Amino acid sequence: MTDMTTQQRMKIKRHEMPNQDQVVRRGNYTEVALGYSEETAKAEAERCLQCKDPKCISGCPVGVMIPQFIKALREGDMVKAVEWMKVKNNLPAICGRVCPQEVQCEGNCILGKKGEAVAIGRLERFVGDYELAHRTCPLVKAADTGKKIAVVGSGPAGLTCAVDLAREGHKVTLYESLHGPGGVLVYGIPEFRLPKAVVHGEISYAVDCLCIDLKTDHVIGRSFTLDELLAENDAVFLGTGAGLPSFMRIPGINLNGVMSANEFLTRVNLMKAYQFPDYDTPVRIGKKVAVIGAGNVAMDAVRCSKRLLSLQTGQGEAPGEAHIVYRRSKDEVPARKEEVHHAEEEGVIFNFLTNPVEIIGNEKGAVTGLKCIKMQLGEPDKSGRRQPVPVEGSEFVMEVDTVIMALGTNPNPIVFVDAEGLDRTKHGTAVADTETGRTKKKRVWAGGDVVTGAATVISAMGAGKRAAADMNAFLKGERTWE
Amino acid sequence: MYRIMKKEVLSDVVKLMEIEAPHVARKAQAGQFVIVRIDEFGERIPLTIADFNREAGTITIIFQELGKSTIQLGKLNVGDTISSFAGPLGHPTEVKNYGTVVCMGGGVGVAPIYPIARALKEAGNTVISIIGARNKELLFWEEKMRAVSDELVVCTDDGSHGRKSLVTEPLKELLENRDKKVSHVWAIGPAVMMKFVTLTTKPYDVPTTVSLNTIMIDGTGMCGGCRVLLEDGAQFVCVDGPEFNGHKVNWDSLLSRLSFYKDEEKKAMEHYAHKCRLESAAAKGEK
Ligand SMILES: Cc1cc2nc3c(=O)[nH]c(=O)nc-3n(C[C@H](O)[C@H](O)[C@H](O)COP(=O)(O)OP(=O)(O)OC[C@H]3O[C@@H](n4cnc5c(N)ncnc54)[C@H](O)[C@@H]3O)c2cc1C
Ligand code: FES
């Protein structure tokens, strides 16, 4: 089939992702998107026009060699497809599942101008899953350089940096404060979107192949300070993320039943509260949940709520309600399109142009309601975005048992303890060069959410990769610090 | 994996363990805490550091068997391991010479107050300690506390040992006694006890530090589940505390948040008891 004309290729319709039934899946935590079959993947790959000047690559924060891997895939050469993929991306099975492709590679795809873009993310996932199952492209460690590196934080930024440096032959120690590696990939993003077996498979493979010394339960800033790490290592990378939750400044935030999305998601995902009491950590949400915000974090929280509500509902009982409360309109929703679509299918109720003003509680200190005010879109501001303004006198109370705040996060604070010379911006993020990741402190690099604030998996990986390249050049004496 | 090096039964429901965790011991200071997770299924529970030995690389924890996790922990023995042990977390106690200080430990709170009393004593303070428990069986470390205190008052609720009173009574007397010139009070114990200690010291305007043990998950500032309402807004106990000015704490909010998962704790206990019964039945069957 690979000798089709452009016109023939353009006639092929984009292939739907097979999904778990939308009603069945409300009651389980297994993955929603089932993945392409080999046949579908090849057929989708046929849609790629192999542009001379591929725009998709420039839309990808790490520049994955997209036309190359797609070509190999449609020619049936999976080993080659994996090789092309791995030139730039070590974690395709993860990125294929969680990247916001519609604003990156697929957003740039020429086919998308008139019709639908090639499903690059789904193909990436297919190739990633193939590699997970077959391991055709082993990670090899170069000869020992005698250099020692400490990487702090095992999310996508730290992992990518650790892997790239270990491949170069440096001795890498990876510090993680939680009991397991993965960062947001394990504590934030739920099982039904990114199975933990995929994350653990990728991490343990890399750690084993490359002899990375993974130290969990190590809180840098407490167990060891940054200066102590510098004394024992030639270079340090900080990929500590942005997990510190913010709460709205409205009355009632300390009531029982008000949680940050991070608390809720950590209970559910990392601690597996959906399997309580087989797992010890509980989570209680009652019958009606309001999630404030409309980013990826909010979508994950509301979809987890929906599942918990179904799981706790007995036969014949009406399942509870899970709401999104967002002060802007649907057009401004920042979450990935697919997540919003899935949430709608699963029966999540969206309340747009609605802004919470107070959380109401009873005499026992438990949440009973969320007082909101209706909003309308006002004049466009300097950025051209129409700002929501309250509609006077439109307050109303939603009866709810649980309020989950998904309003953005700030950098994790502890790594900055006693880290003299490591400059921070007024938002609390580490100051680091975008190209090299160099901070203001000698021999310390940083990247990912700790530098950018909450962003994406792939941008964190990109930052880890760029920093690794610069660190490697520095360690080999090809570049100096000054 | 972290090995249990030593185990002592301090009372019916209070146990002591020394855990091998050099990465925690190297920096641990009085007032800080650790997060412990027993096994793959375990929850992350905060426990205050009761003592540490930098050379041996061990941390002493003392816990009261209150719920599923602490009961399960109490069943482990020397040589057994636990899955995770992270720390030292939180800010250490601000140790300096205040003059005369009162160190109060209620119930299992005697454990964390001990290293604080010792450090304050070493810093040159006159240390008056008041420890208390419901009854004699629940009291421990009386002699250890005596060794680091200039004066020690022991109370039990039922009078089975020491003075029959709540710990706040002798405290009040000390505050009334102008010669003593108490300049700072530390109180660690059940939230209700700490609440009443702060209510007692408030009229005398004596600064009172409490160590809060709210519900925690990560212990590193990532969830906000541990937050406490102070006069001037909410703070995270794990990163901003665990010690706070007790006069600023909103105790009603704290007590209500502590009780949020009561039903689930009960359910976890029942589930665990059931599992234990099945296991012991199976073990008997094998024999
Ligand atoms: C619920 C949720 C859903 C998301 N969904 C998507 C999505 O669909 N697509 C997408 O692209 N992005 C998504 N994101 C964003 C994305 O996950 C993050 O941008 C990305 O994980 C950042 O990677 P990182 O490596 O910088 O930090 P993190 O993943 O946050 O990892 C940081 C790690 O450092 C550890 N750490 C912190 N402090 C210390 C310390 N002092 N010592 C030792 N270790 C420390 C932390 O425990 C953590 O494991 C989502 C985020 C959340 C919270
Ligand atoms: S325990 Fe999670 S923020 Fe304190």
Image: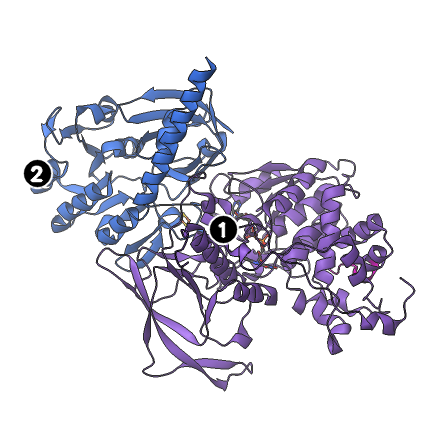
Residue identifier under label 2? B173
Question: What chain is the blue one?
Answer: B
Rendering coords of residue A135 (x, y %): 76, 42
**Which one is in front, A367 or A459?**
A367
| Helix, strand or loop status at disc 1 | helix
- For label 1, the crowd category at 10 Å Cα-Cα, with few meaning under 14, some 14 to 19 and many 20 or more, is many
- In this view, the residue in front, B220 or B177, is B220
Residue at image point 45% right, 57% down: A305
Q: In this view, does B228 lie above or below A275?
A: below
Residue A410 appears left or right of A366: right
> In this figure, which residue is indicated by the disc labeled 1?
A416
- Point out residue B154 in the picture as x, y percentages from the top left corner: 15, 28
Q: Do labels 1 and 2 share a chain?
A: no
For label 2, count other residues whose C-alpha is less than 10 Å away and answer few (under 14), some (14-19) or many (20+). few
Q: What residue type is labelled 2?
A: Glu
What span is in magenta? A63-68
